[in-house]
Amino acid sequence: MLLKKITFVIFYFIASPLFLFAQSNDTSTITIKKTNDFTLTGDGSNANWNKTDWIILPKRDNPNISYQTKIKLLYSDSGIYCLYNCEDKKITSTLKEDFADLWTEDVVEAFFWTDEKTPMYFEYELSPMNYELPILVPNFHGDFLGWRPWHYDGDRRTRHAAHINKNGDAVESWTAEIFIPYKLLKPMQNVPPQKGTK
């Protein structure tokens, strides 16, 4: 069984427009466009997604697998929007509850590290069956453990939807849409991001 994990790491916030620096040694930037808040469908069909282009994520682990994973990102006055498209012929997603160990199966992930001076980041995972794992992870010298959100409701709760794309009975890919409100990321520093924030 091949387990796939799709990861997008967000190391910095810079807003107006929002920029994201790519992973570790890569110094390139990605400009993230602003949007009005919108409804998630799970299949990426909302017209707001037409405002931005796909970002192809680099392949990891097995060079013999030709599946492509891509993401679109937008931000609004209230949070960050992520759309993933994950090519896959076999979905591995048996866990059927939020806050489960989703990373052991097919999942998309986003990591928000909003202040490099603080060894703490927000991690978000979503399975093809639309189960989520939002956690805050402090990492002090390799000693880390995830903490679940408190008062996780109303305008502090994420919105998410997932959809498995088939041709007849054959799985071709799956999509995941996620909205992470800035209010959930509080009290992390630099949230919401302001122009010039690093």
Image (cartoon, rainbow, N blue to C red):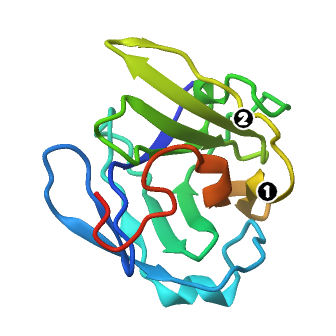
Q: Mark 2 touching mark 1, by CB under 8 A?
A: no
Q: What residue is rendered at 45% in x and 44% in y?
A: 7
Query: Looking at this view, is 82 or 6 the one in front?
Result: 82
Q: Which mark is residue 91?
A: none
Using the image, determine if residue 3 lies above or below residue 127: above
| The image quarter in which residue 30 lies | bottom left
Q: Secondary structure at mark 1?
A: loop
Q: Amino acid at mark 1?
A: Asp
30 horizontally vs 70: left or right: left
Q: Secondary structure at mark 2?
A: loop
Q: Amino acid at mark 2?
A: Pro
Please tell me how crowded label 1 is: few (under 14), some (14-19), or many (20+) other residues with Cα within 10 Å: few
Q: What residue is rendered at 57% in x and 24% in y?
A: 1
User: Which residue carries the number 1 mark?
Assistant: 169
Query: Looking at this view, is 30 or 95 the one in front?
Result: 30
Q: CA distance from mark 2 to mark 1?
A: 38 Å
Q: What residue is rendered at 37% in x and 80% in y?
A: 17
Residue 123 picture location, percent across and down: 54, 38
28 horizontally vs 151: left or right: left
Residue 46 picture location, percent across and down: 70, 83
Using the image, determine if residue 52 lies above or below residue 161: below
User: Which badge, 2 or 1, comes first in the chain's sequence?
Assistant: 2
User: Which residue carries the number 2 mark?
Assistant: 149
| The image quarter in which residue 170 lies | bottom right
Q: Quadrant of the C terminus?
A: bottom left
Using the image, determine if residue 173 lies above or below residue 75: above
34 horizontally vs 129: left or right: left
Please tell me how crowded label 2 is: few (under 14), some (14-19), or many (20+) other residues with Cα within 10 Å: some
Residue 32 picture location, percent across and down: 40, 75
Residue 191 picture location, percent across and down: 50, 57
